[in-house]
Amino acid sequence: MFENILTKESVTFKDLEEIAFKIACEFANEILRNMLEEYDKQVMDNRDTSVYRHKGKETTTIKAKTGLVEYTRTKYITKNEEGKNKCVYLIDEMLNIKEKGQVSGGIIELIVKNIAEVSYRVCAEMINNMTGLSISGVAVWNIVQQLGEEIKQYEKEKVEAFQEDKLKVGEKETPTVYQEADGIMIYTQGNDRKEQIENYKKEHPNEEVPKKVRNIEIKLGMTYEGWKEIGKNRYELVGKEFVAGYMTGEEMADITNANLHSKYDMNKVELRVLNSDGGSWIKKLLTAKAIYQADSYHLKEKISTHV
């Protein structure tokens, strides 16, 4: 490879850099393969043989920062909660390797950091340029969907534990908790828009479909303890946390209350202040100790509108 590029009439540093990077990635992939297979052997030797029955070896590929790493792992048979046989790969579970496309944690972190700012296609191009991996926009979309489902399941289990009084009480103490909530309307397209319209027609057969039915609202909630000065006329919120998604007001309230319960000793909270634009779903966030008011922006907007 190196000899071939030297025969070119003009060579740039970028050419040399790409060759060096490719060689380094290939070398790193081989190291990773050896490490994975050696670790798999240790897991196999130290496993509980009465629980995990050896069922041979399988070769798979993981998408890593250095590219595609092919390695051989051991397959085991164990029992699930219902007493039925299920297949597991202990090394993948211990190393937290995602089964969905066998993606490394490093690649997932890159996707999470970039997907909020760019499209799936551009995110894939950025990863392809920054790493030794070649990934498509569809693959990025699949990973984001899987992460979303995992977050939804985590939130569901947390809310259920809170409602059943099984969620551990937070240790942090604060006299006041501030909350803010708002929504962003997104214009739906394709099947999503068609589904919204059809559902409205079923519920209101004799009415014309209003334009607002074509939209869905992404709800955003924020909690914090207060603010501190970090410079001249510059302030920073303390303990800021967000909850966002396509959900009902009740679901937003459940998740928010579960999060606050697990973070703070809510018995020590003397006051909760809820700021918003006055949307009907936001009132679901109200509690007995809460003060409900329009935030300064919407307060000025209402004064301008009515006065």
Image: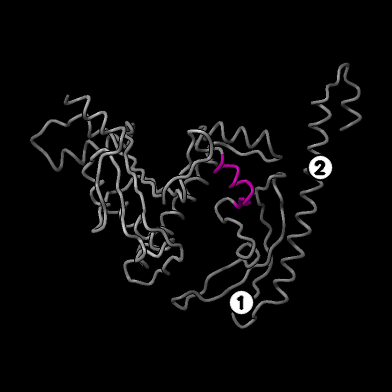
Q: Position of residue 124 (x, y in %)?
A: 59, 36
Few, some or many residues within 10 Å of mark 2 (<14, 14–19, 20+): few
Question: Is 21 drawn above or below residue 268 in the view shown?
Answer: above
Residue 206's x, y, as percent? 8, 35
Residue under numbered circle 1:
52
Q: In the rendered view of the protein, which quadrant contains the C terminus?
A: top left
For the residues bearing labels 2 and 1, Cβ distance under 8 angstroms? no
Q: Amino acid at mark 2?
A: Ala
Left or right of residue 40: residue 300:
left
> Which residue is at the front of the view, 297 or 8?
297
Give the residue displayed 44% in from the left and 59% down from the top. Answer: 154
- The amino acid type found where label 1 is placed reads Tyr
x 66%, y 65%: residue: 91
Residue 195 in which image quadrant: top left
The local crowd at label 1, few if under 14, some if 14 to 19, many if 20 or more residues have their Cα within 10 Å, is: some
Tell me the quadrant of the picture where the N terminus can be found.
top right
Please state the horizontal and vertical placement of residue 251, each as a whole percent of the image: 30, 53
Residue at (34, 71) in percent of width and height: 165
191 is higher (above) or lower (below) than 58: above
What main secondary structure does the magenta stretch of the protein show? helix
Query: In which quadrant of the rendered view does residue 5 lie?
Result: top right
- The span from disc 2 to disc 1 (Cα, nearest Å) is 37 Å
Image side of residue 288 versus residue 152, left or right: left
Total labels: the figure holds 2
Sequence order check, earlier mark of 2 and 1: 2
Work out which residue is located at the far bottom of the displayed protein and give it.
50
Q: On the rendered structure, is 89 left or right of 300?
A: right
Q: Nearer the viewer, mark 2 or mark 1?
A: 2
Which residue is disc 2 drawn over? 24
What range of the chain is rendered magenta?
Answer: 102-113
